[in-house]
Every structure is written in C-alpha cells, then in structure tokens.
Image (cartoon, rainbow, N blue to C red):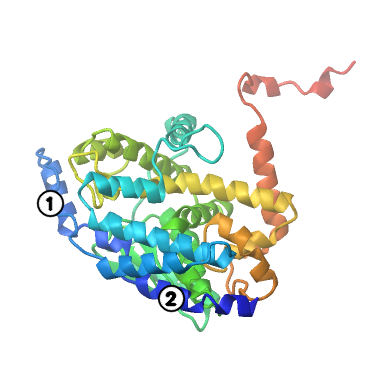
Amino acid sequence: MDTALEQFADLDGRLVDAAKDIKVLSQLAWPANVGAEFLAGWHAGDPRLPAVEPPRVRFDSNIRALASIMRECDRDHPVGRYLYRTARSYKLAAAMIEQAGTPEFTARSIELYGGPRDPVGPGQVSNLSAAEQFLALTDDFRAEGYIPEQEFSVSPEQAADALRQRISPVFGDLPIAVVIDPDMAAKAAAGPTRVRLRGATCFSTYDVAQLVEHEVFVHSLTALNGREQPHVRSLGLGAPRTTATQEGLATFAEMITNAIDLARLRRLALRVKAVDLALSGADFIDLFRFFHDAGQDPGESFHSAARVFRGGDVAGKVVFTKDIVYLRGLLGVHTFFLKAIQSGRPELLHHLFSGRMALGDAIELDPFFRAGALAPPRFEPAWVKSRATLAAFLIYSVLSTSLRLTGIELTDFAVDATDMAT
C-alpha cells in the first residue's frame, strides 16, 4: 500500500501547493467598518444597503495547476479519485471567487455547497423543508421560554483564554494559537495552527462550549491530523468538497457533548431560510429584519445577513450558499455514523478524524487505513473514543424519532395501564 501511494506523492504535493492561496472565507470577508456604518444607520432609523466591493482576484496559475492535476489523476484508483475530486473542488472555488458579485458566483456556490431546495440525501425532503420543519417544531419551545435570552457577557479575550485552557492538555507539543480577528463575519474559524475569534462582539457561555467542540476538536483537530499523514498530506486541506462533512461533524460534536442549545439549532435553520429568501430577491435589509424578527440582536442580525451576501450582491439574488451545509451535514453525519455502527464498521468513524474528508472518502480509503499506509488519527475527541456511548446515543436517537407524537396528549399518561388491570 505504501508503494501504491508513492505514485501519487507528486500529485499530492502539487495539490497542496496549488490550493494554498484559495481561501474562500477570508477572500470573501467584509471590511470591519461595514457593520458599524450599517448599524449606525439602523439605529438612526435610516438603514441603507452596505456598500461592499466584491473581491477582485485572479487564480490563473492555480487553476492551470489544478486542471493539470485533474488530467493526471488515475480515477480508477481510490486515491486518484480522491485527489481528482479535491482538485476539482478547489478549481470550482477559485472560479467562484473570481466571479464574485455576478450570477455565476451563485451558480458555482450552489455547485460546491448546494442550494436550499436541493434534496437531503436520497429522500424527497429538501434543505429548506427540513429547516422549516425544525423551526415549526421549536416555535412552541420558544414561546414557552425554553430558549432564554442569552447574556453575551464573555469578551473575545475571555473566550480566547477559555479555549486555550481546553486546547493545551489535548494537543501537547502541537499547540494551536487562539487569536482575535476584528474583521470576521463568522464568530470563529479554525485551521491546523490557529483558531480565530471575531473581535467585534461578545460571546455567551453557550458560545464558548460550542467553539471548543466545533472549532477546536473538529476543524482544527482534523486539519492537524491530516497534516500528520505520511503520504497524503492534502488530507490536511479544508477542501470545499469536505465542508458539509466538516460542519456536520462539528455540529454533531456540539450535540453529543451537550454543548448545543435550541437557539443555536434554530440559527442553523434560519440560515437555510435566509439563503432561500435572498435567492428569491430579498436584499440585505430584508434579511437583517428577518433575523432580527427571529430574536437576534442587531449586531448578530447584521453578521447573519452578511454571511449570506459574502461575495454576492446586497440587492439580492447573488448570494453565498455555504450556510446550507450545516443542517444537511448534520443529518448526513448522523445517518453515516448510525449505518457504520449498525454494519459493524466503527472504524469508518475514526477515519473521518484522520484528516478533512467527505463521508465517501472514509469508505473508499478504508483499505489504505487497514494496511497502515494512511495513519489513524493522532488526536480524537473523547466522545469518538467512547464507542459504546456513541452507539447508544445514535440508536436511541433513531428509535425516538421513529415515534409519532401526533394524536398523543399529556393526559394520556395520567392513567397507568397496569392500574386498569382487573
């Protein structure tokens, strides 16, 4: 197996080099002053569409290099297919960024991340339908106060310190820096060597727990493990084709560690709805009001709307669809985990933490993991190591969701069936 992988070493190295300049989120980021200007107008009763110039960047040499790699990949070989698909996703991402502000940007974004009306898996439920069902299910909980107003009292510096305390015991001699970035639209972003936190905001205690499990123990951890691979170092890349699996893993991690709350899950569903509204013509102010009416404060409503229009047109229809992947990824990862355990293949779960990959990669590259040519994950979250606990969580979740609540009332539990025995 080592010998088989050696034939791809050159392509793998060239892929890492060609992809290193294609950084989707940072290249689509808005200047920090845009938010302050918009919110000043909002509070003054005169909101105006933000004035944001799309990035003007060319990736000619990168695209040529990626196209050459794609031509040379042996797609009959599992590693060749992996390299081809990864190179292709970076080529699409580069083309997308070059076309920022145009309808072609949105077309490439949908090709990479999907659209709100795409089906989730093999079923007929769309991303939008799943989001709307979730929002409807949680409306009653929201009305009854199960989604309390959160206190955003944790400063970026305090959040960074909390992350550092959790990081140090896990990664030891491979420390991950935590830095504060005032220009970020997302609350955080993570790579193999650092985690960036948004500077122009405060965090809740829920946020801090979610950042640890989501950003550090999934995004940073998988990137770091991928870089540690002896042969296929491109597994350390955050290729766009792996985004749905990465965000699904990270959101699942929040769930199984009790770091998530209903407000967070509602935010994920609201983002799907917002992308659909923007594709249908809603402008930035419409989306800001949509998030504000859903309970987000003005600052968070701005950032939520900005996520959708990164690289797009604030007048509507030209949008960035990445926020589709969170719910879709969560459902996909949950199903994949359950089927892997049900099929007696728990090793597939561990493969996913050996680098950044799509769900299908864990299956196709399995022979190379078994032979030792691909390294198992050096670092893993504690919840993955606890196989029995993970299996119990997955199996019970499927059982519970198969129960129908329609037609059941609380009064049905008032009388125990055994009390009626004669």
Q: Which residue is mark 2?
A: 176
For residue 339, the mark is: none
Observer-nearest of 241 and 378: 241
Observer-nearest of 44 and 13: 13
| Residue 221 visible | yes
Q: Residues within 10 Å of mark 1 (few under 14, many from 20)?
A: some
Describe the element under mark 1 as helix, strand or loop: helix
Amino acid on which disc 1 is placed: Glu
Position in image of residue 371 (x %, y %): 69, 73
Q: Earlier in the sequence, mark 1 or mark 2?
A: 1
Whether residue 318 sits left or right of residue 268 in the image: it is: left
Position in image of residue 48 (x %, y %): 11, 42
Location of residue 4 by image quarter: bottom right
Location of residue 15 by image quarter: bottom left
Q: Is residue 409 above or below residue 87?
A: above
**Viewport quadrant of the N terminus:** bottom right
Whether residue 305 sits left or right of residue 328 in the image: it is: left
Instruction: Name the residue furthest top.
Output: 422
Q: Residue at x 47, y 73 (%)?
A: 165
Q: Are marks 1 and 2 in contact (CB under 8 Å)?
A: no
Describe the element under mark 2 as helix, strand or loop: loop
Q: Which residue is mark 1?
A: 37
Observer-nearest of 326 and 41: 326
Q: Is residue 13 above or below residue 288?
A: below
Cα–Cα gap, marks 1 and 2: 34 Å
Whether residue 210 sits left or right of residue 274 in the image: it is: right
Position in image of residue 308 (x %, y %): 29, 46
Q: Residue at x 66, y 37 (%)?
A: 400
Q: Residue at x 64, y 27 (%)?
A: 404
Q: Is residue 394 above or below residue 352?
A: above
Amino acid on which disc 2 is placed: Ile
